[in-house]
Image: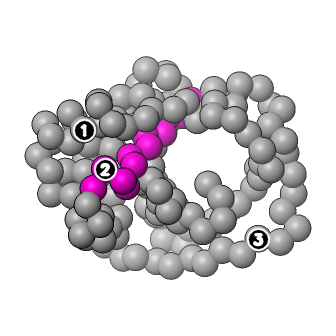
Amino acid sequence: MGEGCTMFIPVWKPGALIFTGDSHAVQGDGEISLTALETRMQEMQIQVILHKQKNFAWPIAETPTHWIALGLDKDLNVAMQMAARNAIKFLSTRASMTDMDAYGLCSIAGSFRVTQVVDIVKGVHAMIPKSLFSPELRSKISVV
């Protein structure tokens, strides 16, 4: 996540707050120790928009080049399965693909990266390149 990216986070509790802590100036894929380049944000501008009644169960991120589906669990294998399932669901519901077509596309063109293993909860993120889709179709695919 960097400048210009969007994170869509489901909210399950009325009055929920947002926390932007644990800022990293630099981190490779897969934080393995507590030694990412931690930093404090002297200036950070975020915009919070509440989209009511949207149907997504897990956080989804969007960058200029990718959609990113997440999977989190204490078991890294389960986190991987969740990331895959979330990517498949995103494609099948947002790109009008069948589950099997989305599954195949994720297998041949998606990138699954370990987000972090330093905490009890492990993370995997599925990178879905926007370049796989025609500009016309890409403009129709929306998280919300």
Label 1 vs 2, first from the N-terminus: 1
In terms of secondary structure, what is the magenta stretch mainly?
strand
Q: Which residue is mark 1?
A: 105
- Mark 2: few/some/many CA within 10 Å (<14, 14-19, 20+): few
If you read the primary sequence from the N terminus, does the residue marked by circle 1 or circle 3 appear first? 3
**Residue range corresponding to the magenta coloring:** 121-133
For residue 16, side relative to residue 60 (left or right): right
Residue 30 included in the magenta stretch of the image: no
Residue 9: x and y in percent read 48, 60
Residue beneath label 2, please? 132
Give how far across and how far down residue 103 sits, in percent.
22, 35
Which kind of residue does numbered mark 3 sit on? Answer: Met
Secondary structure of the residue carrying tag 2 is helix
Residue topped by disc 3: 44
As measured in the structure, the alpha-carbon distance from the residue carrying label 3 to the one carrying label 2 is 32 Å
Mark 1 and 2 residues: CB-CB less than 8 Å, in contact? yes
Q: As displayed, is residue 139 above or below residue 71?
A: below
Q: Which mark is residue 20?
A: none
